[in-house]
Image (cartoon, rainbow, N blue to C red):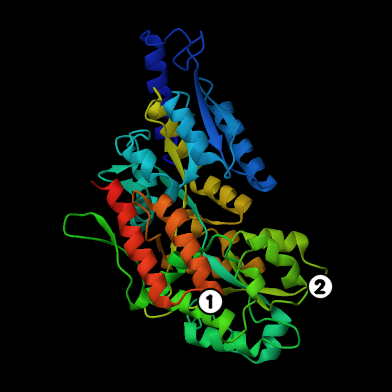
Amino acid sequence: MRGAVRRAAVAVTVLALLLSGCSGDGDDGRDADGTIRLRFQSLAWQKESVDANKRLVKEWNAAHPAVQVEYVQGSWDSVHDQLLTSFEGGEAPDIIHDASDDLADFAYGGYLADLRPYLPARLKADIPERSWRTTTFGEGVHGVPFLQEPRVLIANTELLKASGARIPTPERPWSWQEFRQVTKELTGKGRYGIAWPLKEPVSVTLNLGLSGGGRLFHRDGDGKAVLRFRRGDGVVPGTIRDQVNADRSAARGALGMGGSDALPGFFGGKYAMLPLGFSYRQQIIQQAPEGFGWSVLPMPAGAGGAVQGVSPQTLSVAEESPYKEEAVAFIDFLLRPPNMVRLARGDWMLPTGTRALADPSLRSAEHGWAVGAALAKGLRPAPAQSVRGYPEWKDKVATPAYQEFYSGAIDADELSERLVEDGNRVLARYQR
């Protein structure tokens, strides 16, 4: 957030508009007295996160009487269809909370404003370029990436120590081969070394696949997206399949679970480790039995290095909003470093902003915050971030193919064939 100069500039701009008689009849988002009304649709759902967002909206409104923001509660479960309906009906909220991997079709469809003319220098400089790439479609920037979530290993501390395995660190993670061996050693006496909750297998596989040197999505000479399955693309899915079918160190029954579904088995000692999103730490704190010891570990790394893909949470502005500058000013306020820290802690995630990420409260050893903060430098845009047609490929091609591969129903050759040949036919329809 720019300092007092930025706040004063916005106030002067708004006042000038009011004095110049540019107010409408109330249908353009202004009250009869000229007050601008903006709607902010938030997808926050955890109580801490909802409370943090609502408090920040209240603070903005108290400091900006001429530009008032209304908090609107949305849902991650239905946001894509809800936004599409509101865009087509001309009733989209001014400020839109979403995830970067959901923006491509909206951005290319002209529903989201290009924020480049409005973004303040402080915000542009504070968020790394690799994060901005997640919201860049064509030449335009169609969202501000502000929260991100690495995937980590949550381990039963007692079982891990008893195994004698080397404890991985962000500086020296396990290799995928070492990780496979550790899960073997943790397996036995009715316990699996790991459970992979892969109800939604595609983003997990692609994002972790970067560490194995995989990418799957490439650009040809014309800039069109094309699928190619190379050796690195098989490292992560091959490890998971071998753990389930060859080593029997991963629980087959967990493949159809979500992360929350696997927690009772973890607490009960059925699984020694779980690969989960960083924010699951909150659920673990709330649900773990008294005295249960758990540790946050980095995911394994391979030829691609200690990297993984992410799709940050984003804040965008509707193209149809008549008050884009005011909407971005609110986003800028929301993402001041202290406020970004509040949002990150409320969602148990990492901020994208470098100043917020340096906050001591996000680098504490307690609850694994320090491990997560150390992983931030290895976060990269998800491989299919800007690919049109990705949602259809994911749902119709990749999800069933990966599910069958992990269960042992098809082999690596058939997986590759289905992902690439069937997938390129899907992508071609979106790139004519």
> Looking at the picture, how far across and down is residue 322, in whole percent?
39, 22
Residue at the left extreme of this rendering = 221
Could you tell which of marks 1 and 2 lies nearer the N-terminus?
A: 2
- Between circles 1 and 2, the one closer to the viewer is 1
State how far apart marks 1 and 2 are (Cα).
38 Å
In the foreground, 399 or 369: 399
Query: Left or right: 354 with respect to 151?
Result: left
Q: Which residue in the protein does label 2 denote?
A: 291
- Is residue 41 in view from this perspective? yes
Compared with residue 83, is residue 48 higher up or lower down, i.e. above or below? below
Q: Residue 408 bears which disc, if any?
A: 1
Helix, strand or loop status at disc 2: loop
Three-letter amino acid code at the position of disc 1: Gly
User: Looking at the rendered structure, which numbered label has been put on residue 358?
Assistant: none
Residue 7 seen in render: no
Where's residue 113, x and y in %? 35, 34
Badge 1 marks a residue whose secondary structure is loop
Could you tell me which residue is drawn at 76 percent across and 71 percent down? 267
**Residue closest to the far bottom:** 164
Q: How packed is label 2: few (under 14 Cα within 10 Å), some, or many (20 or more)?
A: few
Residue at image point 58% right, 61% down: 199
Give the residue displayed 34% in from the left and 35% down from the top: 118
In the shown orientation, is residue 297 left or right of residue 310?
A: right
> Measuring 43% from the left and 38% from the top, which residue is drawn there?
316
Residue 60 pos. (x, y %): 55, 31
